[in-house]
Amino acid sequence: MFSLRSFKRTAKRFYLHSRREALILVYHRVTELDVDPWKLAVAPRHFAEHLEVLRRHYRVSELRRIADGLAYGRLPRQSVVITFDDGYEDNLHCVKPLLEKHDVPATFFIATGLMKNEREAWWDELEKMLLHPGVLPQVLRLSLKGEVREWNLGEGALYTEEEHEHHRSWDAWREPPPHARHALYLELYRLLQPLSAAEQRRALDELHKQIGSMPECRRTHKFIVSPEVAALADCELIEIGAHTETHPLLVALDDAAQRAEISSSKRLLEELSGRRVRSFAYPYGAYAEETISAVKSTGFDCACSTGSGLVRKNTNPYMLPRLFVFDWDGEEFDRQLFDMFYV
């Protein structure tokens, strides 16, 4: 027998199905990582459960249909859109087969410069350097924008296997740093984020030199390469979107640099995919009026941020909100989506 609570939930779902709103989800990776401070990875078994929930309870739509709906003033009824940011290799080898198995569409926003795989994304490289067991120098120095900064790690120079095991699940979004290494990671993350890609590389190279390490790219942290873009685009369920060239904090760049980052990624992805690239995602979700203007003038139909919320008929197509998806099991994922639509 159904409980009253279950009946009410079912009734609410029936009501919600008639509303013309959309929820855009943002994922990054589908894999299992030893250390994942920003919780970018969703376990493959959980992602499969997410797809089952979506097929059972929601209409899964293409992002281009949402953009068209906003342009013509008629959104599809209660829709959910799946997007992936950055272009990690598991998007091709793990995500694509699951999408095909469940017949669910998605948009992949690719940062074209990361496809070179010359080294890991700067945030991954920093994590590898600081959040794994070992001994660092007692003092680390870094020259940034002409200013020399210094950190005395003290006892934090040593990070033991036991400490690593205890702190490996640290969540940088929600938890304070549990160790001097994590505090340093957060501070350096915030210092490096607004820098250009060249400045980030120089800073990381300085740290590698002091630590005695090399910027080697882990197999688990590689990005898709240029020929693989066509393999994604050949799948009818997949739409390719742009995510700049070097994944910069666009608002920290001047207008010309923003336009170059935005246009170069669109141009290369269209060349590689053989398709028009209609959608864009702001790295880190950050944008200003100048950024929106650059995206519009480059010929994109819509752009996604990382601010949470629903897409409604009056939503600016260049400020589309998205819900960050964590490593929830199917039940929690269902609850999160239900709460987004109902509230």
Image (cartoon, rainbow, N blue to C red):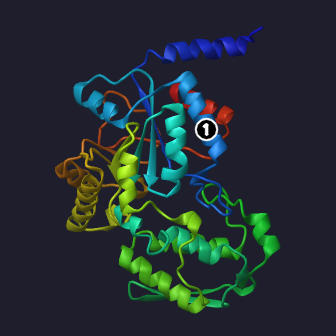
User: On the picture, is 135 further left or further right than 208?
Assistant: right
What residue is rendered at 39% in x and 50% in y? 231
Q: Position of residue 173 (x, y in %)?
A: 60, 56
Q: Position of residue 44 (x, y in %)?
A: 63, 46
Identify whether 86 is placed above or below 83.
below
Quarter of the figure that contains the N terminus:
top right
Front one among 136 and 28: 28
Q: Position of residue 109 (x, y in %)?
A: 39, 51
User: On the picture, is 308 further left or further right than 333?
Assistant: left
Task: Tell me the SS state at disc 1.
Answer: helix
Identity of the residue furthest to the right in this view: 162
What residue is rendered at 59% in x and 35% in y? 50
Q: Can you see residue 281?
A: no
Q: Position of residue 106 (x, y in %)?
A: 43, 40
Front one among 50 and 74: 50
Identify whether 101 is placed above or below 145.
above
- Read off the residue under disc 1: 48
Identity of the residue furthest to the left in this view: 297
Q: Quadrant of residue 46?
A: top right
Identify whether 199 is placed above or below 330.
below
Residue type at numbered disc 1: Ala
User: On the picture, is 249 further left or further right than 51?
Assistant: left
What residue is rendered at 67% in x and 58% in y? 175
Identify whether 19 is placed above or below 34.
above
